[in-house]
C-alpha cells in the first residue's frame, strides 16, 4: 500500500466512525415496545393482517407526519374495532396516541398528524371486540426528526 | 379556553359513514425542548379529545407528546337522523375547549 492511499483510507474510516458515533448520540435508540403492547393485549398474540397504515415513505420533517390507519372490519355490534393504538419505537415516549372507536363510527379509519424522532418502525395495534388483536408495522424514513433540538445533540 | 374547530360534510346520507375532522390550537410542548436561555420548556400537552353525536359518545382519543403541535384528528361516524356533534378537549393543565357542528342527514 502506498503511503498516500494508506492515509486516505485511515481518514475515511475515522470519518465513518465519527458519523456513526454522532448519529447514535443524536437519535434515541429504538426501544422495545413489546411490554407496552403486552400491557394492552394481556399476552394474546396479535394477527399480522388487516391493518393498513398509510405513512409517507420518506419524511422530510418529523414534526408533522400525516398518518392514516384503516382496519378491515364490518363495524357491527358483534364485530368492531374498539381501539387503535399507535407506537413509535424511537420516540422518547413511544406511545403516540390511542383512538377509541365503536360501532357508531361505521368505518374503522382514523387519521392524525404525528411526530417521529428519526427513521424507525411505526407499529399500529388494533383492539377488536371479542379480545382479538391485529398489528400492522410500517417502516418510515425520517431525514429530520422531531422532539430533539440542537441543545440535545 | 382552548380554541379549535370541527368540520363535517354539509349533508350526509342516513347510515353512511362520513368523515369528522377536528383541529385544535395547542403547542403540544414535549418537555424536551429548551428556550434561548437554555431553560427547559415545561411539558404542556392536549391529552384528550372526545366526541358525542346526539349525546352519545362515538369517539375518543388519548394523545401523547408524539402528536404534532395543533393536533389534527379525523375519524368516521354514522348518523340515522340529524343531530348535534359535540367535540370536547382538555389539556394536562386543566384547560378545556369545545366545538359543535350540526350533522344534516338527508334520506339515502
Image (spheres, coloured by chain):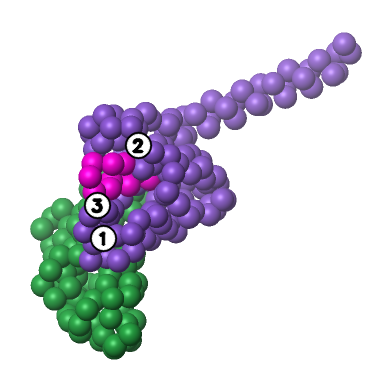
Q: In this view, does A48 lie above or below A103?
A: above
Highlighted magenta segment, given as a residue range: A123-133
Q: Foreground: B59 or A16? A: B59
- Give the class, few, some or many, for how many residues have Cα within 10 Å of label 1's Cα (few <14, many ≥20): some
Screen quadrant of the N terminus of chain B: bottom left
Residue ID at (19%, 76%) = B85
Q: Disc 3 and disc 2: Cα gap in Å?
A: 14 Å
Instruction: Determine the chain carrying the residue at label 2.
Output: A
**Color of chain B here?**
green
- Give the class, few, some or many, for how many residues have Cα within 10 Å of label 2's Cα (few <14, many ≥20): some
Q: Foreground: A31 or A42? A: A42
Q: Disc 1 and disc 2: Cα gap in Å?
A: 21 Å
Q: Circle 2 sits on which residue? A: A46
Instruction: Determine the chain carrying the residue at label 1.
Output: A
Q: Circle 3 sits on which residue? A: A82
Quick one: SS at disc 3?
strand
Looking at the magenta stretch, what is its main secondary structure?
strand
Q: Is residue A79 visible?
A: yes
Q: In this view, does A64 lie above or below A9?
A: below
* Residue A127 belongs to magenta span: yes
Q: Disc 3 and disc 1: Cα gap in Å?
A: 11 Å
Q: In the rendering, at what x and y percent does residue A105 appear?
A: 27, 65
Quick one: SS at disc 1?
loop
Q: Circle 1 sits on which residue? A: A76
Amino acid at each position: 500500500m502506498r503511503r498516500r492511499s494508506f492515509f486516505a483510507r485511515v481518514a475515511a474510516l475515522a470519518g465513518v466512525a465519527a458519523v456513526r458515533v454522532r448519529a447514535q448520540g443524536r437519535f434515541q435508540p429504538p426501544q422495545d415496545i413489546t411490554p407496552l403492547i403486552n400491557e394492552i393485549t394481556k399476552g394474546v398474540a396479535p394477527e399480522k393482517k388487516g391493518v393498513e397504515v398509510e405513512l409517507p415513505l420518506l419524511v422530510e420533517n418529523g414534526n408533522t407526519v400525516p398518518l392514516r390507519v384503516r382496519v378491515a372490519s364490518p363495524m357491527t355490534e358483534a364485530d368492531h374495532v374498539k381501539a387503535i393504538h399507535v407506537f413509535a419505537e424511537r420516540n422518547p415516549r413511544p406511545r403516540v396516541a390511542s383512538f377509541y372507536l365503536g360501532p357508531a363510527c361505521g368505518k374503522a379509519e382514523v387519521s392524525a398528524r404525528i411526530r417521529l424522532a428519526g427513521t424507525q418502525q411505526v407499529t399500529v395495534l388494533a383492539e377488536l371486540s371479542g379480545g382479538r388483536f391485529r398489528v400492522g408495522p410500517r417502516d418510515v424514513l425520517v431525514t429530520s426528526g422531531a422532539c430533539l433540538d440542537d441543545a440535545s445533540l | 379556553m382552548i380554541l379549535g374547530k370541527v368540520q363535517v360534510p354539509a349533508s350526509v346520507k342516513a347510515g353512511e359513514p362520513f368523515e369528522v375532522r377536528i383541529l385544535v390550537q395547542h403547542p403540544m410542548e414535549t418537555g424536551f425542548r429548551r428556550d434561548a436561555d437554555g431553560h427547559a420548556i415545561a411539558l404542556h400537552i392536549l391529552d384528550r379529545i372526545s366526541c358525542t353525536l346526539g349525546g352519545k359518545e362515538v369517539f375518543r382519543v388519548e394523545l401523547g407528546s408524539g402528536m404534532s403541535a395543533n393536533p389534527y384528528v379525523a375519524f368516521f361516524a354514522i348518523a340515522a337522523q340529524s343531530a348535534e356533534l359535540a367535540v370536547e378537549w382538555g389539556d394536562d393543565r386543566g384547560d378545556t375547549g369545545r366545538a359543535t357542528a350540526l350533522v344534516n342527514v338527508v334520506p339515502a
